[in-house]
Structure formats: C-alpha cells, structure tokens
Image (spheres, grey):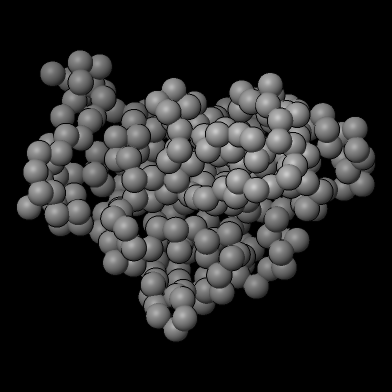
C-alpha cells in the first residue's frame, strides 16, 4: 500500500511573514533544580506547527513557559535576529503569546471582555486601540474560532472546554508571531479537538510559528509538521511525525510497546499494545 506523506508547508500567497526561532544552550529550572540544561532545540520556522510531546516531567511545559517569558532562562532564544531573553513584557507581547494549560474558572468577565482585555495588554498603536476597533477585532477572532455565540457569556459560567476555546481566542487575538499552546485539547471533545488542530494549522499558514504541547500522539501524527519528543529535559527524537514518533523511540521514552500503522487513506496511527 502506498503511504501518503504530508506535503511540504507552503505559506499562502499574501503572507509577508518569514522567520525562524533558534534556541541554543537553554538552561532553566525551579527552586535551584535544573529542568532544561544547555538544551538545543531543532529550528522552529514560520508556517509550521511543531508539537512538543513526551511523558510527564519531560520538560515540555517548562520549555513553553521559558519561551513565553514566564521563567528566567539562560542561553539564547533568537527570533529573526532579536534575542527574546531579556525583552520587557511589553516587547515580548508584540512577538509571543501563550495559552496556559489550566484556565481559571473564577474570572468575572464576559468572553468578549476577556478577549478585549488581552488586546489592551498588547502593544498596539493608538489607532487600533480605539474601543470600537478592539471590539471588532475581538469579535472577528471569536467568530473565527467558532464561539461568537458565547461573546456575552460570563467565563465563570462556561464549561471547561468552552473556557479553553475562549482562552485560545485571548491568545491569538494579539496577532503574535509566535503562538504557544500548552495542551489546548485536554478538556475538549473530539469535534473541538479537530477544530483546534485545524485552527492551529490555519494560524501557522497565516505566517506564525505555532508550538503545541500535546500528549495525544495520534493528534501529533495527523496535524503536526514537526514533532519534538522530550524526555528528562532532553530531546529524544525530532523530525516529521513518522520520523520522530517511532516504535523504538516510544518504547525508550514511554516504556510501552506500540505499532505505527496506516489507515486506508495512508494516514499514520499509533496503537498501544502493552507496557514494557
């Protein structure tokens, strides 16, 4: 049977963004305990969806939080010649936007108000900061994500999955060049998992670097351009999905026996057989 490979990423015509993110010698930890030690990350490029995966405590979320400016790493994170380490919060907000894994459920704002508040925290020019413009921009993003009908609902009254979609809207409304999503599908049903992954690809094709932490390796096989498998703060495998998610790598990292098979459409799928 002929296996269908994902075609090379082609940025849509009209997209003017180009660029790459180079991460070298990254050192970061908590309370004096190193999590990432002199980590070099494979090149991250505009137009690509990169998935970070690996077992618990592998360093995935630590890497994402370091990129988001929530930790104080050493080393280099260079985007298009600009060093991200050391940037002010305002400067970084013009480049990077981060969706956390856990969304608070006690925020007393409507979905629209929460999205507008994210815009007001970003470095937009005075013309785009007028209230009407902010509302229009916020509504366009809510409509793109498919939750415009929730615009006036209070965040505290939403389900976990709905709050997660609202958090995605708050993250992308800033129009970042680097979009970081920490387990964005964890509280979602199957339909909305597909919705989020399709949106991630669309965001990348608009001219962004998209980095997603995922535990679901089948989502990674289906939607990623590049997968980085992490284990104990190091890179255990990387490349195109079927190059990085292999039976050997998964056995070494997760301690389980798996098979990577292909469906009738040629798409790769992982089946877990047993623990080792």
Q: Is residue 144 above or below residue 226?
A: above
Residue drawn at x 64%, y 25% as measured from the top left: 147
Residue drawn at x 40%, y 80% as measured from the top left: 33
Q: Is residue 143 above or below residue 55?
A: above
Decide if residue 73 is on the left or right side of residue 148.
left
Residue drawn at x 34%, y 50% as measured from the top left: 53
- Asked if residue 248 shows in the view, the reply is no
Q: Of residues 156 and 238, which is closer to you in this image?
A: 156
Q: Of residues 219 and 40, which is closer to you in this image?
A: 219
- Asked if residue 258 shows in the view, the reply is yes
Q: Position of residue 50 (x, y in %)?
A: 43, 45
Decide if residue 169 is on the left or right side of residue 23.
right
Q: Position of residue 24 (x, y in %)?
A: 45, 68
Farthest top residue in view? 264
Decide if residue 65 is on the left or right side of residue 81.
left
Farthest bottom residue in view? 32
Q: Position of residue 229 (x, y in %)?
A: 30, 53
Q: Of residues 229 and 12, which is closer to you in this image?
A: 229
Q: Is residue 148 above or below residue 137?
A: above
Hey, which quadrant is residue 84 in on the image?
bottom right
Q: Looking at the image, how many numbered discs can be counted on the residues?
A: 0
Hey, which quadrant is residue 254 in on the image?
bottom left
Q: Position of residue 146 (x, y in %)?
A: 61, 23
Residue drawn at x 43%, y 41% as measured from the top left: 186
Q: Of residues 212 and 237, which is closer to you in this image?
A: 212
């Amino acid at each position: 049977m002929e296996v269908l490979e994902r075609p090379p990423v082609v940025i849509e015509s009209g997209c003017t963004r180009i660029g790459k993110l180079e991460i070298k010698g990254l050192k970061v930890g908590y309370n004096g305990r190193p999590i990432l030690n002199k980590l070099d990350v494979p090149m991250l490029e505009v137009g690509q969806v990169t998935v970070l995966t690996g077992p618990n405590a592998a360093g995935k979320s630590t890497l994402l939080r370091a990129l988001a400016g929530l930790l104080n790493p050493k080393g280099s994170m260079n985007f298009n010649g600009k060093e991200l380490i050391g940037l002010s919060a305002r400067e970084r907000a013009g480049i990077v936007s981060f969706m956390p894994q856990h969304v608070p459920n006690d925020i007393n704002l409507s979905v629209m108000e929460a999205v507008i508040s994210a815009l007001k925290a970003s470095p937009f020019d005075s013309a785009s900061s007028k209230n009407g413009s902010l509302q229009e921009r916020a509504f366009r993003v809510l409509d793109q994500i498919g939750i415009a009908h929730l615009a006036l609902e209070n965040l505290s009254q939403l389900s976990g999955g709905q709050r997660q979609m609202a958090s995605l809207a708050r993250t992308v409304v800033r129009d970042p060049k680097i979009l970081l999503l920490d387990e964005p599908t964890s509280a979602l049903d199957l339909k909305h998992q597909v919705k989020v992954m399709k949106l991630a690809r669309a965001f990348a094709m608009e001219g962004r670097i998209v980095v997603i932490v995922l535990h679901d390796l089948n989502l990674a096989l289906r939607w990623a351009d590049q997968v980085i498998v992490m284990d104990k703060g190091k890179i255990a495998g990387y490349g195109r999905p079927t190059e990085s998610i292999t039976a050997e790598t998964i056995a070494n990292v997760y301690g389980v026996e798996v098979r990577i098979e292909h469906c009738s459409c040629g798409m790769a799928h992982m089946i877990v057989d047993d623990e080792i």
